[in-house]
Image: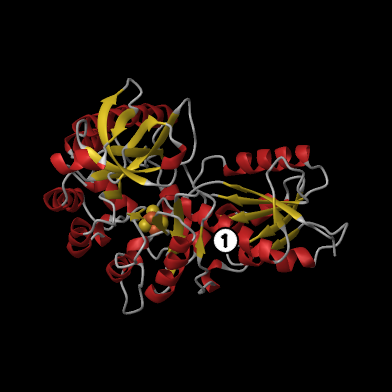
Amino acid sequence: MIPFSKVAYYTLGCKLNFSETSSISRDLMEAGYARVDFFDHPDVYVINTCSVTDNADKKCRKLVKDALNHSPKAFVVIIGCYSQLKPKEISEIPGVSLVLGAQEKFNISKYLKNINTGDAVKVINSSIKEIEEFVPAFSNNERTRSFLKVQDGCDYHCSFCTIPLARGKSRSSSVVKIVATANEIVESGIQEIVLTGVNIGDFGNGTDESFFDLLKELNNIKGLNRIRISSIEPNLLTKEIVTLVSNSNKIMPHFHIPLQSGSNEILKAMRRKYDREHYQSKVELIHQLIDNCCIGVDVIVGYPGETEDYFLETFNFLNELNIAYLHVFTYSERDNTTALRSDQVVPMADRTKRRKMLQILSEKKKRKFYSDNISNIQSALFEGENKDGFISGFTNNYIRVKTEFDAKKINTINKIKLISLDEDCVMTGSIVKQEELLTNSYSN
Ligand code: SF4
């Protein structure tokens, strides 16, 4: 056994990965391992990888190299989606000592105890089909908000996606357990909980609980000021959920809803569970029930078979839709996906051109959404950093706003009037005092 004592972490990818790294680091602290900075000469590096990221392999190699440059004798553990999907490839990266799969990553201390000097690279990886257990996680490294994992895995079979292969079948915790964890987070002084998972609308699948049940209970937690839903599939976003959000002053008026394409032919090829008309009806429902709600959209360009006409359908659909921003992804080929079988490959130059067009559209949408909010009074939760004399935070409807720095504002929710927008779409606001509120009408 090697006497390890200091561990550094690096996380690639999504909020779910961040919540899991945070929980893994707490477990290791309980087992006696201190958490240290990446450059603080740790004995162990834990790198939590992502399979969605382009060039996962390159990024992983670079991180291992950087880690060993700083701490040449460190022991490098690779976990996360990429290590479940490509364990052999990772084990061949020079400097890697241990590769753990989707379930094994939650038992790092057990594996560290059994390592001896001179051991060959170990790969410990169960078959993803066998994984039934839901392992809870939440992040607590930020003072203001916590990413709380409520669900894992996915039973959908979108043709381009490797996540079900990396994370397994859909499973979740119970409402009672999540509420207990949420209470623990609130007691630590955190103001906002962001609900995360792979397909969170599928929460409770196979039980008699639903995502709506979970939201209802979280909404009743005393002392919890903000709940944000990270992302939800359009077919799982029900009218009762939207109505609950519209009647709640805790669940933020902000939805992130994956669209992926505005062409019904491409949606069908992708095996998505809705068409564009269904998607549009959800956006309309939200705006009918919730004033000034922020809606973000995921979209993929260059999926096999996406002709110029199909792309323009997507572009025009999004251009007309009342949404606030886009997250644009360029389609990239992934092993073991059905999309890979198509021979209607879109040339990379076209994918790049389409991505840029949608990014420009996203900027335009965001500017419009922000501009429409100028003069409104919103609530903002301020984060810690003093950046050039300013403190910033997000409003309920997800507008980042900055105002003059005041240390007393850190981790507090304040009413703020949105005043002006600069060229880079940065909103400046001014804090509204209690007396002013009594004489003004305000939103949210
Ligand atoms: S819903 Fe589709 S894209 Fe999302 S994780 Fe499941 S299979 Fe992947």
Nearest to the observer: residue 198 or residue 190: 190
Residue that badge 1 annotates: 23
Please tell me how many numbered marks the rendered image carries: 1
Whether residue 353 is visible: yes
Q: Is label 1's Cβ within 8 Å of ligand 1?
A: no
Crowding at dot 1, Cα within 10 Å, few <14 / some 14-19 / many 20+, comes out as: some
Nearest to the observer: residue 92 or residue 439: 439
Residue 127 position within the rendered picture, expressed as x and y whole percent measured from the top left:
58, 68
76 is higher (above) or lower (below) than 404: below
- Residue situated furthest bottom in the rendering: 208
Q: What is the quadrant of the N terminus in the image?
A: bottom right
- Residue situated furthest right in the rendering: 118
Q: Which residue sits at x=80%, y=67%?
A: 114
Secondary structure at numbered mark 1: helix
Q: Which residue sits at x=59%, y=67%?
A: 103
Residue 356 position within the rendered picture, expressed as x and y whole percent measured from the top left:
36, 27
Nearest to the observer: residue 350 or residue 200: 200
Is 413 on the left or on the right of 8, as rendered?
A: left
Q: Which residue sits at x=52%, y=54%?
A: 17
Residue 64 position within the rendered picture, expressed as x and y whole percent measured from the top left:
70, 43
Is 17 on the left or on the right of 40, as rendered?
A: left
Q: How is the image coloured?
A: secondary structure
Residue 244 position within the rendered picture, expressed as x and y whole percent measured from the top left:
21, 62
The image quadrant in which ligand 1 is located: bottom left
Is 442 on the left or on the right of 150, as rendered?
A: left
- Residue situated furthest top in the rendering: 423
Whether residue 153 is visible: no
Q: Say which quarter of the image contains residue 182.
A: bottom left
- Residue situated furthest left in the rendering: 288
- Residue kind at label 1, given as amino acid type: Ser
